Image (tube, rainbow, N blue to C red):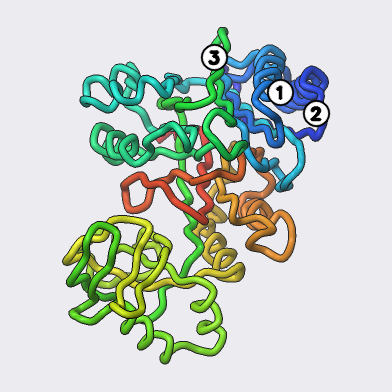
Amino acid sequence: MTDPMSFASAVTRNTDPREAANELSAQIAAQLNKRAPDLALVFMSRFDPDGAVEVAECISAALKARLCLGCTAESVIGRDEEIENEPAISVVAAYLPGVEIAPFAIDPADWQDALSAPEAFLERVAASFEPKLFILLADPFTSPIDEVLEMFNALYAGKPLIGGMASGGGASGSNVLFLSRGELVTMTGGAVGVALAGALEVDMIVSQGCRPVGRPFTVTGAQRNILLSLEDQPPMARLQELFNELSEEDRELLKSGVYLGRAIDPTQGDLGRGDFLIRGVMGADPERGIIAVADYVNEGESVQFHLRDAATAAEDLEMMLLPQTFLDPPAGAFLFTCNGRGTRLYDHPNGDVDIIQNALGGTPLAGFFCAGEIGPVGGKNFLHGHTASLVVFRPASDE
């Protein structure tokens, strides 16, 4: 009888690469009953590129996983803690019987060719099976992520893609991404990833942490990312109307930041939380009454203003996780959360992971604070900000 799917996770603050690798691999081996992992994800914070490469070498050799991939991060996440702004390494490893795995790595110099035609893209990320899930780790300085996501959405329509942008450095060449499938490949740009299929089931939880206020509007004027009019009125006038209607508490939130939700399904009538792709408002021209949005906006689409704070973020994540509480506990999970969350958002540590584990019951988990989170909303994959993107794994049902 085949052993069941199982996950293990471990963290260390040990900065010696060899000692850290031995410590982590021992924890993983104990949790997996000494079975070799089929897949391992590794995230490391506060390591320079040379140090990160050494960590990748040591951990890949120690774990002996069929596939190991990872990247540098500003901060990392373990099963029960978010380790912010200090050196640490977090690992999640999985024994995946009956699961097919197809890794890929794209060097920065290859992006132009890879995106030149669908056939060229498929050559680099194609699998010999129908994927159920893609995981992608990418460098924000060298990866044209919007074009990459467009290609994934076109070629693998409806297939979820989850992951994040490496956040370990603030300039091109300061991040490290790696992939090991017997032979280690390290890069200071580009992307690494894997497609999964077979005997597994995945649930995606993408919590954008906002709530709509006011009512939806139809865009009647827009130019690229500039919102010119909402139902023939300047958007600043609509914001003033909204401000006058809000409670004092919400007025303070609006003063500190306002977000615009773009309706994912333009044909949907009743719109509520979860029906929007959230984008930040970047600036405004009070004289003309127009606003700039961190995305292109099109005439005819429905939009609604949104607010965000710690309480709303927590409530949204709890709501998104509620269906999980009615299911059997998952085998494991990967978490990709914004580097604007953590203690930058909450007034206490472990804000997201506490909520997640309260719903999942202590499942093995690892992740990192990203410079942009990737996850599906409304059946399409997007790059997000201020979001928690989570994927949970269970073995395929016998039905």
Residue holding disc 2: 15
Q: Earlier in the sequence, mark 3 or mark 2?
A: 2
Asked if marks 2 and 1 touch (Cβ < 8 Å), the reply is yes
SS state under label 2: loop
Q: Which of 295 and 218 is in front in this view?
A: 295
On the image, the x and y values in percent for residue 380 come to 32, 46
Label drawn at residue 326? none
- Looking at the rendered structure, the number of numbered marks drawn on it comes to 3
Q: What's under tag 3, amino acid-wise?
A: Val
Can you say whether 102 is above or below 265 in the image?
above
- The kind of residue tagged 1 is Gly
Identified by mark 2, the residue type is Thr
Q: Nearer the viewer, residue 79 or 190?
A: 190
- Residue furthest out toward the front: 287
Please tell me whether residue 179 is drawn above or below residue 294 in the rendered image: above
Instruction: Identify the residue at image location x=81%, y=23%.
Output: 16
The quarter in which the N terminus is drawn is: top right
Name the residue located 62 percent from the left edge and 50 percent from the top edge: 360
Q: How crowded is mark 1: few (under 14 residues within 10 Å), some or many (20 or more)?
A: some
Mark closest to the chain's N terminus, 2 or 1? 2
Give the spatial CA distance, label 2 vs label 1: 9 Å
Q: How many other residues sit within 10 Å of disc 3, few (<14), some (14-19) or many (≥20)?
A: some
Displayed quadrant of residue 343: bottom right
Name the residue tied to disc 3: 185
Q: Name the residue under label 1.
A: 51
Mark 2: few/some/many CA within 10 Å (<14, 14-19, 20+): some
**Residue at mark 3 to residue at mark 1: CA–CA distance:** 15 Å
